[in-house]
Image: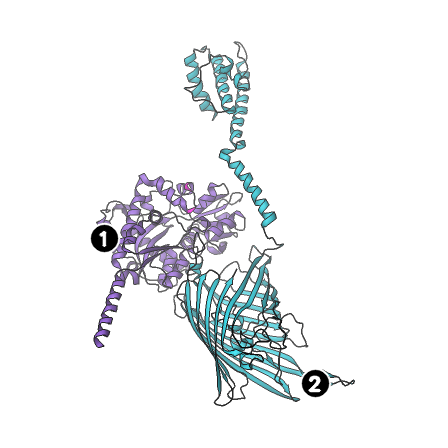
Chain colours: A cyan, B purple
């Protein structure tokens, strides 16, 4: 930078102004002139050359004194020019440094002010309007708003065949056919407690709570029975690296969580096409004498679950991952959510699912066969009279509580089919005598999607706005539960015709028409119809 | 009654025939996105056509809508959409298209869009690494399943290295760039986007395929066989529109304008300037399906099979369909705009695109 300034300016000035031609003296003088010009330029923009008044050589204006710049040393014939040149060079360097520093301190087109404003705004927004947490956190939730119509007038006492349907709330009703309902409002928190940047063996957590109306028909209170239940409350650790898509997976989850059994029980609200669960999911545990205790698969259990995916393949050509074998082993209290164990035994559960190895383009893609087993032990009780004559509940032994399941899952966009068979064995005590109540269930669901909602590629497309591909999903389902296989003609069958409209990223409108047939002895069937219209949204 | 049924049948048949002549929408998938998830891509003449709204101008007058989808999942995501019949055309690179074709996806390549596509390996500016060899045992981010992966694998092989010499992490380009800056990756293999980091003074290129035509990738415009069979005249019109955009890019007078258009993707003007320094855009982004293009696609396929990235071979010559290109060049009098290349990459003559 220095050389061009000196050479171009000095040459012109010296010749035009008749400066003494002595080589050393002329060089020093020329440098002085240049420095004066550079100094002035460093202080403030110079006027255009054509407009600048000419100043006599050696005048204050010409040397830069008038602009407040450092004065170059006077050049006198016979001085040591070398020393002067060194001094001048030093001054040139100082001026150069000032020139280079200039733009950094200037507010270039208001940029510095804008940045300061932005920093202030960000800090203020963060302090006053930003939710913060101590750890990595994702907040979400699911809410359902529903209108339900039932074909018969509902009047307390509600008939047994209607029990546990969505229209059985509150506990005392009179001649009701239509009701508005918020069946579920769930709040979810999840995040990472420890993030392994190298291999992604992360430690995560999940906490969720749901406010849902009770379907209990006990009592005559007008209380709505709406309360908040803790659903998930667990920590999960990845035992194998998950940094790559194509490796095997093994993770353990400790705390309150869903039981890894079958398809229906593990399908969350966001993914299930049908509004209501299959009947077996909500079927509670039998303990004889016409009463039921404990809980079905629709509630969480507290315990430890080990899940793994092995012989995994990842088709990078489609970003498609499939594991030949998926395993789940679990140990639970078996007493349901938010409750301690009530005996020495732990309920055990195992599930294995085999996915048919197939290319993404193959029609066999996403064809899976699963088998599940749950082995539980329940406390059997009987009524007894203590020494004071009071009636108490006495322990009468442990009862077997076993479940078997087999399922087929085929979800090959746009077609999806699920089939599930479940058998439930409960050892009960009736009139002091042990027996086993066996129930079985069959569920078939078929759906078809018009639209791109379920394609990862479409979901992850670039876009400016919040647009979302609309998807229309008609489906049919057949659901059957036989509450006691030893008794004929007591099964419940529900056929559902439904339609889902996905019109925003986490929102769907659902319409289900349920035709229910309750067998009540040989040749007698009681039929009813339920229509559910629901909007479900997540956030 | 019989007459009514017959008339109704004829009306339905006529309606179906009309529907077959003209779709309501032409769906175009792009295996790229812009910075900040914006639906804009840069780096090719297809981007110029998109910026100019050229396809819309061509087809909207017939009541046909053009629907672009820009996939964050790049080529593999395009494949998923193609396999599920959500696209008619796709702009993508070699590896994902070959994976899909080998897997049975029925497509045809009708236009080349690039050759010698460069892949670079960048490290954080404060990294001591100066070469690929210095990165042995380190974490390198690569967007697997994309054309970048194949070129990167070939770059390693050209240096006597292999994948297992490094810890390869599958990451999208934008995630990888962020991970590079946060030092969660020791290096990142990607394309032009890396020059944006270099420009900012936060990264440094330590290896590149630039200057070696045989290491670079090729890319294309493909159409589904179903669409091509039903609407060949629309395929021709689309090819012609893209050829006009390619000719615009090929004109040296438009070079700066081309970079300006591409920089709308968020990759900086200067990044493109560096990427294409001393590069003839007409050569790099030639639409010709010439000897080099055919030979290189065959080389790419063989390499992909050797590396077990593609499971089975298929006939490249049958996949490449230059008929629309040849006709377009004739109709637009573009025969002399681009020069053909020999199989080894040497420039031959003005367009002679047949086998």
The image quarter containing residue B276 is top left
Q: Which mark is on residue A383?
A: 2
Q: Quadrant of the C terminus of chain B?
A: bottom left
Depicted A73 relative to depicted A384: above or below: above
Residue sitting at 47 percent across and 76 percent down? Answer: A514
Q: Is residue A182 left or right of residue B263?
A: right
Q: Nearer the viewer, residue A239 or B309?
A: A239
Q: For residue B342, say whether it is visible.
A: no
Q: Magenta region: which residues?
A: B265-269
Q: For residue A499, say whether it is visible.
A: yes
Q: Which mark is on residue B107?
A: none
Say which element carries label 2.
Answer: strand
Q: Which mark is on residue B327?
A: 1
Q: Nearer the viewer, residue B86 or A139?
A: A139
Depicted A287 relative to depicted A265: above or below: below
The location of residue A12, given as percent across then percent down, is 41, 17
Residue sitting at 53 percent across and 21 percent down? Answer: A89
Image marks 1 and 2: residues in contact by CB distance under 8 Å = no
Farthest residue to the left: give it.
B3
Q: Quadrant of the N terminus of chain B?
A: bottom left
């Amino acid at each position: 930078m220095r050389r061009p300034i000196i050479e171009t300016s000095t040459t012109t000035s010296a010749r035009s102004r008749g400066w003494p031609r002595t080589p050393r003296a002329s060089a020093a003088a020329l440098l002085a002139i240049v420095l004066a010009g550079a100094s002035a330029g460093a202080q403030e923009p110079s006027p255009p050359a054509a407009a600048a008044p000419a100043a006599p050589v050696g005048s204050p204006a010409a040397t830069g004194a008038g602009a407040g710049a450092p004065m170059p040393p006077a050049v006198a014939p016979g001085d040591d020019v070398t020393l002067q040149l060194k001094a001048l060079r030093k001054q040139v360097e100082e001026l150069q440094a000032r020139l280079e520093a200039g733009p950094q301190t200037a507010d270039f087109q208001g940029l510095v002010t804008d940045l300061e404003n932005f920093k202030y705004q960000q800090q203020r927004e963060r302090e006053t309007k930003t939710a913060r947490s101590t750890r990595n956190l994702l907040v979400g939730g699911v809410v359902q708003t529903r209108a339900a119509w039932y074909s018969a007038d509902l009047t307390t006492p509600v008939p047994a065949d209607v029990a546990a349907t969505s229209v059985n709330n509150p506990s005392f009703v009179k001649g009701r056919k239509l009701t508005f309902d918020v069946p579920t409002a769930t709040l979810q928190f999840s995040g990472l407690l420890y993030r392994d940047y190298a291999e992604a063996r992360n430690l995560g957590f999940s906490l969720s709570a749901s406010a849902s109306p009770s379907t209990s028909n006990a009592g005559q209170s007008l209380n709505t029975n709406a309360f908040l239940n803790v659903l998930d409350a667990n920590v999960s650790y990845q035992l194998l690296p998950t940094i790559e898509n194509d490796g095997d997976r093994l993770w353990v989850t400790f705390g309150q969580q869903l039981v890894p059994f079958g398809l229906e029980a593990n399908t969350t609200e966001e993914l299930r096409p049908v509004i209501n669960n299959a009947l077996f999911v909500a079927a509670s545990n039998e303990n004889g004498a016409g009463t039921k205790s404990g809980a079905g698969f629709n509630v969480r259990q507290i315990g430890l679950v080990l899940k793994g995916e092995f012989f995994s393949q990842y088709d990078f050509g489609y970003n498609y991952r499939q594991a030949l074998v998926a395993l789940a082993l679990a140990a639970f209290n078996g007493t349901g959510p938010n409750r301690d164990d009530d005996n020495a035994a732990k309920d055990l559960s195992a599930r294995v699912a085999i996915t048919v190895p197939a290319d993404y383009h193959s029609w066999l893609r996403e064809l899976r066969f699963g088998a599940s087993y749950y082995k539980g032990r329940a406390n059997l009780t009987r009524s007894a009279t203590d020494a004071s004559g009071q009636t108490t509940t006495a322990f009468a032994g442990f009862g077997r509580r076993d479940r078997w399941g087999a399922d087929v899952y085929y979800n090959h966009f746009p077609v999806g089919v699920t089939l599930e068979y479940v058998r439930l064995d409960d050892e009960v005590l009736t009139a002091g005598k042990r027996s086993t109540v066996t129930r079985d269930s069959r569920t078939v669901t078929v759906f078809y999607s018009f639209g791109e909602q379920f394609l990862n590629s479409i979901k992850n497309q670039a876009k400016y706005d919040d647009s979302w591909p609309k998807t229309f999903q008609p489906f049919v389902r057949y659901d059957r539960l036989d509450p006691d296989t030893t008794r004929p003609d007591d099964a419940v069958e529900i056929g559902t015709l439904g339609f889902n409209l996905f019109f925003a990223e986490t929102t769907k409108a659902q319409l289900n028409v349920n035709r229910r047939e309750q067998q009540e002895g040989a040749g007698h069937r009681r039929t009813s119809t339920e229509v559910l219209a629901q909007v479900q949204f997540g956030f | 009654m019989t007459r009514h049924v017959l008339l109704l049948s004829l009306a339905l048949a006529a309606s179906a025939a009309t529907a077959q002549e003209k779709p309501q929408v032409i769906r175009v998938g792009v295996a790229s996105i812009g910075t900040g998830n914006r639906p804009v891509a840069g780096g090719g003449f297809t981007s110029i056509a998109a910026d100019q709204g050229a396809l819309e101008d061509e087809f909207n007058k017939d009541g046909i809508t053009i629907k672009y989808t820009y996939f964050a999942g790049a080529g593999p995501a395009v494949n998923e959409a193609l396999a599920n019949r959500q696209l008619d055309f796709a702009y993508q690179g070699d590896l994902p298209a070959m994976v899909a074709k080998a897997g049975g996806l029925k497509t045809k390549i009708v236009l080349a869009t690039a050759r010698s596509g460069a892949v670079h390996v960048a490290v954080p500016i404060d990294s001591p690494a100066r070469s690929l060899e210095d990165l042995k045992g380190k974490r390198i981010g690569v967007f697997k399943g994309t054309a970048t992966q194949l070129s990167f694998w070939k770059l390693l092989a050209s240096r006597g290295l292999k994948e297992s010499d490094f810890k390869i992490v599958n990451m999208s380009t934008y995630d990888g760039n962020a991970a590079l800056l946060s030092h969660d990756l020791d290096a990142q293999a990607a394309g032009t986007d890396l020059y944006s980091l270099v420009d900012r003074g936060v990264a440094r290129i330590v290896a590149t395929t630039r200057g070696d035509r045989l290491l670079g990738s090729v890319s294309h415009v493909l159409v589904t066989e179903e669409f091509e069979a039903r609407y060949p005249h629309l395929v021709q019109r689309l090819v012609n529109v893209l050829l006009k955009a390619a000719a615009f890019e090929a004109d040296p007078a438009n070079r700066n304008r081309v970079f300006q258009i591409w920089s709308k993707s968020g990759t900086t003007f200067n990044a493109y300037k560096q990427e294409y320094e001393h590069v003839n855009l007409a050569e790099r982004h030639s639409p010709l399906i010439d000897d080099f293009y055919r030979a290189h696609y065959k080389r790419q396929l063989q390499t992909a099979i050797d590396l077990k990235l593609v499971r089975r071979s298929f006939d490249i010559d049958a996949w490449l369909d230059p008929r629309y290109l040849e006709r377009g060049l004739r109709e637009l009098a573009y025969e002399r705009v681009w020069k053909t290349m020999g199989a080894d990459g040497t420039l031959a003559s003005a367009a002679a695109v047949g086998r």
